[in-house]
């Protein structure tokens, strides 16, 4: 599958398609063991590999949630709300300090979508490797500030208003898949800027963030490239430095 957006924006890495599947793709990377970062697998897919996840291999509990394998937070040692905030104390994982209190952390947890994927596998693969007949559910771009600016404008170009992109506080994998997948089910789906998760940043290039788009919105944006600002002088001045 070819992306005119990717070509116009001169992306460092190709877009990643996220798909559902009932069969494990041959040669795909998969976690073996109790821990791994889904964001690192997304980066690997952006660089040309495939990755696959199931309900037994999702990296960490937050990753399992982010991949749509259900609410796994009740399994968290010492409680997820304490982990995200102040910690539980000796013998438990230290608090991350991402929320001021367990009570505030609970409001975040309760606000996450609870959608569960309908398939055995969730698959990350380069968009360019998506074959005819395969249907991504989300497409993810890794972008610089200039490229992000273009995607935000393009996401709003063919729509009313100016709020067709969101930047939620969430884990990197949740902003790459769970939230944009949930958005895709809404009457007016929005794109999601992500990878602002401090814990995920070490596996992402320092100058990149993610921009995840529900599949239908991706097709809409692709169709809107011709005749948009991407053909105009103002963008040419920015594109010259990409």
Image (cartoon, rainbow, N blue to C red):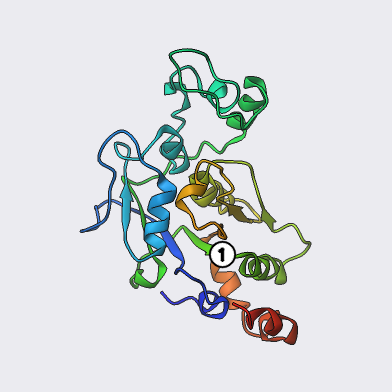
Task: Choose top left, top right, bottom left or bottom right for residue 161.
Answer: bottom right
- The residue beneath circle 1 is 143
Residue pushed farthest right?
Answer: 161
Residue pushed farthest top?
Answer: 90
Q: Is residue 76 visible?
A: yes
Question: Where is residue 34 drawn, in percent x and y?
Answer: 31, 33
Note whether 181 is above or below 133 in the view shown. above
Question: Where is residue 190 drawn, in percent x and y?
Answer: 64, 56
Note whether 9 is above or below 79 in the view shown. below
Task: Choose top left, top right, bottom left or bottom right for residue 16.
Answer: bottom left
Q: Nearer the viewer, residue 173 or 54?
A: 173
Q: Residue at x 41, y 46 (%)?
A: 38
How many labels sit on residues? 1
Question: Where is residue 233 drawn, in percent x and y?
Answer: 73, 87
Q: Residue at x 21, y 58 (%)?
A: 27
The C terminus lies in quadrant: bottom right
Q: Residue at x 48, y 48 (%)?
A: 202
Note whether 168 is above or below 132 in the view shown. above
Q: Is residue 228 visible?
A: no
Q: Residue at x 38, y 60 (%)?
A: 45
Q: Relative to residue 207, is residue 68 drawn left or right?
A: left
Q: Element type at marker 1? A: strand
Question: Where is residue 44 drawn, in percent x and y?
Answer: 37, 58
Note whether 30 is above or below 241 in the view shown. above
Q: Nearer the viewer, residue 229 or 148?
A: 148
């Amino acid at each position: 599958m070819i992306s005119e957006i990717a070509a116009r924006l001169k992306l460092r890495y190709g877009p990643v398609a996220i798909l559902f599947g009932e069969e494990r793709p041959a040669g795909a990377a998969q976690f073996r063991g109790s821990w791994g970062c889904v964001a690192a697998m997304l980066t690997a897919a952006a660089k040309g590999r495939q990755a696959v996840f199931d309900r037994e291999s999702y990296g960490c509990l937050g990753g399992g949630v982010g991949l749509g394998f259900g609410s796994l937070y009740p399994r968290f040692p010492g409680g997820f709300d304490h982990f995200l905030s102040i910690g539980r104390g000796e013998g438990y994982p230290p608090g991350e300090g991402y929320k001021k209190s367990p009570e505030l952390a609970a409001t975040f947890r309760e606000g996450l979508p609870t959608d569960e994927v309908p398939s055995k596998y969730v698959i990350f693969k380069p968009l360019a490797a998506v074959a005819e007949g395969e249907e991504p559910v989300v497409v993810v771009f890794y972008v610089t500030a200039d490229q992000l600016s273009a995607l935000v404008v393009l996401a709003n170009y063919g729509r009313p208003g100016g709020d067709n992109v969101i930047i939620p506080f969430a884990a990197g994998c949740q902003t790459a898949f769970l939230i944009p997948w949930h958005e895709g089910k809404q009457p007016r789906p929005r794109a999601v800027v992500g990878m602002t998760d401090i814990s995920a940043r070490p596996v992402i290039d320092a100058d990149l963030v993610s921009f995840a788009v529900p599949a239908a919105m991706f097709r809409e944006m692709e169709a809107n490239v011709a005749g948009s600002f991407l053909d105009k002088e103002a963008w040419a001045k920015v594109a010259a430095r990409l």
